[in-house]
Amino acid sequence: MASKKKISAIDLFCGIGGLSYGFKKAGIDIKIGIDIDKSCQYAFETNCKSKFINRDISEVEGGELNSLYDKNDIKVLVGCAPCQPFSSYTYKSDKQKDHRWQLLYEFTRLIKEVRPVIVSMENVPTLLNFKEAPVFYDFVDSLEKKGYFVWHRIVYGPDYGIPQKRKRLVLLASNLGDIELLPPTHTPDKYMTVREAIGHLEKINSGEYSKKDFIHKASKLSDINLRRIRQSKPGGSWKKDWDDELKLSCHTSDKGKTYVSVYGRMKWDEPSPTMTTFCTGIGNGRFGHPEQDRAISLREAAILQSFPNDYKFVDEVENLKFGNISKHIGNAVPPKLGEIIGKTIVKHIKEYNYGKKKE
């Protein structure tokens, strides 16, 4: 009689659990999530049904992680390092002084110590550009030298049913053989739209939250920003839509003229712009609701990230810290992308008939 070993993952930099939640849907057991931000604990443990460890991974040893896997587990190690030091916003900063810049090297160390069968990483596409500080290329090289088959590519969210024009760098590595992400599930004519994702939600005003769901809360707009959003058209810009008296002086500068999407409204019938840590404020991008005179709510941002409608972020309204949750949502791996990565891993292991044993 044949039995299968269990595929089990440890999620480094787990945040609020977007990747782990997707892995669980794909049938992968989540041993633990590790993150330095303790405020992620409630969301991770409540939704992923797994233990959260509040640690800096530079202080974690491989032996500790190995002790968390069961003896016969097929070990998966995933790590989506914080993307801020790799983003275009910080491209010109002194990256060598940023502790987060070194986290991929810590991930490399843990891979060497744990020796998982599968490794996965997700990050911003601009990580590929940093040839003057080639942390990503060092990461790939170290994996290949350890005998892993490595695949990486920039993935477009709408191709996998994510209602958001998000591009992310996805890496998969296996010590079994060639591995690559499953093919797209959606074509451009079938992309999930803003309307399909959030059109069903209750109407709320600026600064209000739904009595049915306190995460469906919108930031409070000032009087002048209310006037601005009322003049904004879906897919339009302040440059064309606003009266001159509403325009900021920074907009009319040469540099400001390029930021035409700020204070803009989303279009109903397209995927949304990329959700960022500031996606619930209209001054940070095209984050205005298509019809209602407000920025998108926390719940809408989460759904556009492909979190389910009932994903829990805090236990009660009194503990809701708006900016904190907005940051967590923007930083998260979209659960649908996590599920695709998880399904890829499960399929890959089945193809290699790995983990079966005779009894």
Image (spheres, helix red, strand yellow):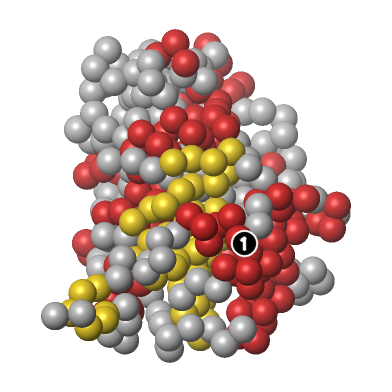
Q: Is residue 147 above or below residue 4?
A: below
Mark 1 is surrounded, within 10 Å at the Cα level, by few (under 14), some (14 to 19) or many (20 or more) other residues, namely some
Residue in the image at 61% along x and 84% along y: 146
Which quarter of the rendered picture does the C terminus lie within? bottom left
Q: Is residue 194 above or below residue 345?
A: above
User: What percent of the width, then of the height, locates residue 27?
Assistant: 26, 60
Query: SS of the residue at dot 1?
Result: helix
User: What percent of the width, then of the height, locates residue 80?
Assistant: 55, 57
Residue in the image at 61% along x and 79% along y: 143
Q: Nearer the viewer, residue 184 or 193?
A: 184
Lateral position of residue 101 relative to residue 66, left or right = right
User: What percent of the width, then of the height, locates residue 347?
Assistant: 28, 76
Q: Is residue 342 above or below residue 275?
A: below
Let me know if residue 10 appears in the view.
Answer: yes
Q: Is residue 61 above or below residue 73?
A: above
Q: Nearer the viewer, residue 60 or 102?
A: 60
Residue in the image at 81% along x and 71% along y: 132
Which quarter of the rendered picture does the N terminus lie within? bottom left
Residue in the image at 23% along x and 23% along y: 202
Q: Which residue is mark 1?
A: 62
Residue type, mark 1 in image: Gly
The outermost residue toward the front is 359
Lateral position of residue 290 relative to residue 168, left or right = left
Q: Nearer the viewer, residue 31 or 268?
A: 31
Q: Nearer the viewer, residue 32 or 334?
A: 32
Let me know if residue 232 appears in the view.
Answer: no
User: What percent of the width, then of the height, locates residue 320?
Assistant: 46, 19
- Displayed quadrant of residue 307: top left
Mark count: 1
